[in-house]
Image: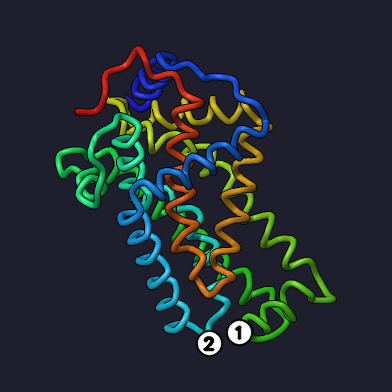
């Protein structure tokens, strides 16, 4: 059954074309993401504010357990794409010249469409797995107690013995790379078109494999701007999250040719 499902999804994914884009096109996606935020600021800023508040609360609650927070904050990058679903819907409405507001964002989560919920649960599992892996690695291989960011810097990043930080980064990359490849256009695609989750993942992988330079730059921008948002005591996420979310919609629209498939009702 699973082989037949995979074969069917692979065939379905071939209904999509992948467009070629210049290497620096991701900078244009950011500019268009900013423009969408300026046109319809309320949904994006509320999303960003909610996330910043959650991150701040998490930091306060576990401020003396940075060995756990390090994984939690980096694990956020794995689940962030699903949190932006409502903002994809806002960009979609703006693109069509339709009214866009907070209701547009909330309506993206239709109770009768389980695909986004399924994808969200899979990303949550991946994020939880990384948090547990990160915590286990830091507590078992660290040369001191990791209670604060300073402890993390001293005993993990700048540790003179072993290669804990390098191993931590490598394991994070091993998990993050396939998640990025699986989600980079899959979630906007699921919002926009009637397609199975597995087929959306296949086309997302095709996009990354056929556009490696542009997608590497896009991954770097996502990581860098999110990291900067976190370093500003989460306040930067209020703006960074909606800009990146709207930009992700434009990345999908530039990269994937969906003209032969029905729209999501």
Q: Is residue 169 left or right of residue 182?
A: right
Specify the farthest residue to the right. 160
Percent coordinates x, y for residue 168 in the rendering: 67, 62
Tell me if residue 185 comes above or below residue 153 in the rendering.
above
Q: Quadrant of the C terminus?
A: top left
**Residue sitting at x 59%, y 86%:** 147
Answer yes or no: do the residues labelled 2 and 1 have beta carbons within 8 Å?
A: yes
**Residue sitting at x 50%, y 60%:** 75
Residue to which mark 1 is pinned: 148
Q: Earlier in the sequence, mark 2 or mark 1?
A: 2
Q: Is residue 59 in sight in this rendering?
A: yes
Q: Residues within 10 Å of mark 1 (few under 14, many from 20)?
A: some
**Residue sitting at x 53%, y 82%:** 65
**Residue sitting at x 48%, y 70%:** 235
Residue 64 — which label? Answer: 2
Q: CA distance from mark 2 to mark 1?
A: 6 Å
Residue 132 — which label? Answer: none
Element at label 1 = loop
In the figure, residue 95 lies in which quadrant? top left
Q: Residues within 10 Å of mark 2 (few under 14, many from 20)?
A: some
Q: Is residue 141 left or right of residue 4?
A: right
Percent coordinates x, y for residue 236 in the rendering: 51, 65
Q: Quadrant of the N terminus?
A: top left
Element at label 2 = loop
In the figure, residue 165 lies in which quadrant? bottom right
In the figure, residue 171 lies in which quadrant? bottom right
Specify the farthest residue to the front. 39
Specify the farthest residue to the left. 112
């Amino acid at each position: 059954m699973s082989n037949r499902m995979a074969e069917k999804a692979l065939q379905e994914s071939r209904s999509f074309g992948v467009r070629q884009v210049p290497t620096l096109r991701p900078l244009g996606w950011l500019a268009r993401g900013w423009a969408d935020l300026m046109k319809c600021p309320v949904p994006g800023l509320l999303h960003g504010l909610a996330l910043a508040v959650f991150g701040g609360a998490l930091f306060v609650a576990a401020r003396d357990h940075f060995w756990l927070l390090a994984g939690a904050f980096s694990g956020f990058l794995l689940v962030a794409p699903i949190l932006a679903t409502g903002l994809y819907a806002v960009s979609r409405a703006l693109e069509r010249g339709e009214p866009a507001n907070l209701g547009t964002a909330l309506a993206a989560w239709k109770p009768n469409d389980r695909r986004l919920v399924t994808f969200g649960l899979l990303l949550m599992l991946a994020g939880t797995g990384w948090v547990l892996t990160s915590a286990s690695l830091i507590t078992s291989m660290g040369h001191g107690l990791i209670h604060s960011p300073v402890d993390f810097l001293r005993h993990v990043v700048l540790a003179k013995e072993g290669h804990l930080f390098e191993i931590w980064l490598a394991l994070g990359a091993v998990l993050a790379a396939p998640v990025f490849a699986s989600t980079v256009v899959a979630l906007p695609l699921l919002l926009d078109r009637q397609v199975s989750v597995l087929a959306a993942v296949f086309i997302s992988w095709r996009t990354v494999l056929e556009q490696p330079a542009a997608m590497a730059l896009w991954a770097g921008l996502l990581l860098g701007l999110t990291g900067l948002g976190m370093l500003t005591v989460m306040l930067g996420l209020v703006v960074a999250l909606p800009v990146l979310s709207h930009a992700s919609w434009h990345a999908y629209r530039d990269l994937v040719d969906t003209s032969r498939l029905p729209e999501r009702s």
